[in-house]
Structure formats: structure tokens, C-alpha cells
Image (cartoon, rainbow, N blue to C red):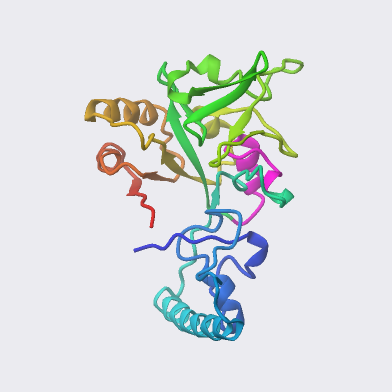
């Protein structure tokens, strides 16, 4: 089974090989599939109320064990390379983080995907939802948030018409201003979605037309965990997406929905479909 791990591009000495010895700890986070699952290195243990010397010893033991395991994987997979996937393009936006790199480019945008193409990545990952008028759009959150008449307003993406969805944030038409785009944090705070390099919201069709053609697409089908979907609804959503599914682009289909992955697998030729899960 493929492992999905995370690291910054700059933290990995080579994207094509697993390196030995003290660099194995950095290489291990690549796993066998994703490079930029999240724009930070994911640690394998947490330092909580433990003596420092014990933590260091455990860290060394963990690194040694994982180095040996990585070497075995390298031997088994000789001649093969990692499939490197850019998470939401060049990386997700963590608006509350002090790390300015996490607010560099608007996530899930054409600009972010093409910025990722400047690195040695094979795929870009993005999130697809279907609007009320049956158009697949690329957006991560279930709700889109703005400020209207001094009040915070949020609407479910799938309840919007495409025209309404595209009115949020910067606009493609020069001189036209869109609705302010805000983002709701998990702790309830609402922040301005400010990034250094902004870009308009986009559709799946635009991604197929405007993203660097050498990149494959790792498409996550977004479903609200708080809603119950009938098979007819899932079929309707998948058909809308597959209608705009370009056969010329390598694709991996992902979903947290146990029901949608088999449907996608059976409906789409030359597409790998997997179910995501949290641990």
C-alpha cells in the first residue's frame, strides 16, 4: 500500500532517490506517493512531558529503524522513482501561520498549479466540488465566506450557481472587483484570504485548458462529512465531473467517500481511484 507523507521541496535533497544515513529521515517523509501533502514536514513523534535524553534516544532509534526500512524499500523499488504530488498546487494557504511561505500563492488556483510545475513534481492535487448548475469547480472548503454590508456571510459552494461562485475574490476581467474572499478557521475565526500572489477561482475545465500539460492531476472529490448522499446524488456529481474529464491528462481520483471511489473506478477508464481515510 502506498504511503502518503509530506515534506517541503527544499527539505529533500533529491526527488528521484531515497538517500542513506542521516538524510534518510528527511527522505522518509516522501513515502511513495506525495511530496507536498501539507507544506510542512510531518514529525513521527511528539515531545510531550518527556525527558530530553529519552526523546533523543527514541528519535535516534526511530531514525535508524526507518533508515533501514527505507533502504529495503529502495532495494525493492530499484529503478523506480517517487510520484511527487503538489498539494493544492504549490501548497495550501495557512492564513494564521507566521510562516509567510504558507501565504505565498493562492491555493487551488491556476497560478498555484503552474508555479508547482516549476519544481520536479509529477501531479498537482486539488479539490473538486460541483455547483448547483452542475459545473465542477476547484475549491477546498465546503463554505465560501465573504463580508456583505458589514456582516459575515457564508454559503455552501454546492448551493451556488457557477456565475455566483466566480464572483468571489480577484476577477479575470481587468478592472472588475469581486466580493471580498474570507476564510473561516477551525477555531471559528474569520480571516481575510490575503496571499502574496492572488489568482481568481477556477473551474475544472480551466485546469485542463490552462495548467502546464506535463502535470498529471490528483483530483480529490469533495463531499461534506455532515451530509448524507444518496447513490443518485453521487452518480449525478461524478457524471458532471467525468463529462469534463480530459483523457489526455494522467489522473488519480481520491475521495473520503467510501461509496464514490468504486463508482469513479468503474466509470472512468485509465483512472486510478482511491478512498482517503484519516488516522
Does residue 173 appear left or right of residue 236 in this picture? Answer: right
Residue at x 44%, y 41% (from the top left corner):
219
Q: Quadrant of residue 4?
A: bottom left
Q: Quadrant of residue 206?
A: top right
Residue at x 41%, y 63% (from the top left corner):
3
In this picture, which residue range is highlighted in magenta? 102-120
Q: Quadrant of residue 106?
A: top right
Residue 3 in the image: above or below residue 23: above
Q: Nearer the viewer, residue 161 or 245?
A: 161
- Residue 112 is covered by the magenta coloring: yes
The quarter of the picture where the C terminus appears is bottom left
Q: Indicate the position of residue 28 as horizontal and vertical percent values.
A: 51, 71
Q: Indicate the position of residue 140 as horizontal and vertical percent values.
A: 51, 36
Q: Indicate the position of residue 159 as horizontal and vertical percent values.
A: 43, 19
Residue 16 in the image: above or below residue 123: below
The quarter of the picture where the N terminus appears is bottom left
Q: Nearer the viewer, residue 179 or 252?
A: 179
Q: Indicate the position of residue 177 as horizontal and vertical percent values.
A: 72, 17
- Residue 117 is covered by the magenta coloring: yes
Amino acid at each position: 500500500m502506498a504511503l502518503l507523507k509530506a515534506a517541503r521541496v527544499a527539505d529533500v535533497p533529491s526527488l528521484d532517490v531515497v538517500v542513506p544515513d542521516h538524510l534518510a529521515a528527511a527522505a522518509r517523509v516522501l513515502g511513495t506517493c506525495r511530496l507536498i501533502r501539507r507544506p510542512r514536514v510531518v514529525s513521527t513523534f511528539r515531545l510531550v512531558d518527556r525527558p530530553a535524553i529519552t526523546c533523543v534516544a527514541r528519535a535516534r532509534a526511530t531514525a535508524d529503524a526507518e533508515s533501514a526500512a527505507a533502504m529495503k524499500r529502495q532495494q525493492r523499488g530499484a529503478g523506480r522513482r517517487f510520484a511527487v504530488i503538489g498539494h493544492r498546487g504549490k501548497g495550501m494557504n495557512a492564513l494564521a501561520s507566521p510562516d509567510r511561505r504558507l501565504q505565498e500563492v493562492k491555493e487551488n488556483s491556476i497560478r498555484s498549479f503552474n508555479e508547482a510545475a516549476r519544481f520536479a513534481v509529477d501531479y498537482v492535487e486539488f479539490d473538486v466540488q460541483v455547483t448547483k448548475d452542475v459545473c465542477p469547480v476547484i475549491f477546498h472548503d465546503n463554505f465560501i465566506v465573504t463580508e456583505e454590508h458589514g456582516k459575515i456571510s457564508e454559503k455552501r459552494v454546492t448551493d451556488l450557481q457557477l456565475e455566483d461562485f466566480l464572483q468571489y475574490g480577484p476577477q479575470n476581467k481587468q478592472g472588475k472587483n469581486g466580493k471580498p474572499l474570507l476564510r473561516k478557521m477551525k477555531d471559528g475565526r474569520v480571516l481575510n484570504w490575503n496571499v502574496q500572489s492572488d489568482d481568481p477561482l477556477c473551474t475544472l475545465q480551466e485546469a485542463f485548458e490552462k495548467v502546464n500539460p506535463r502535470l498529471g492531476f490528483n483530483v480529490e472529490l469533495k463531499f461534506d462529512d455532515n451530509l448524507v448522499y444518496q447513490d443518485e446524488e453521487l452518480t449525478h456529481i461524478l457524471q458532471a465531473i467525468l463529462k469534463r474529464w480530459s483523457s489526455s491528462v494522467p489522473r488519480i481520483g481520491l475521495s473520503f467517500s467510501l461509496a464514490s471511489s468504486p463508482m469513479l473506478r468503474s466509470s472512468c477508464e485509465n483512472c486510478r481511484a482511491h478512498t482517503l481515510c484519516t488516522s
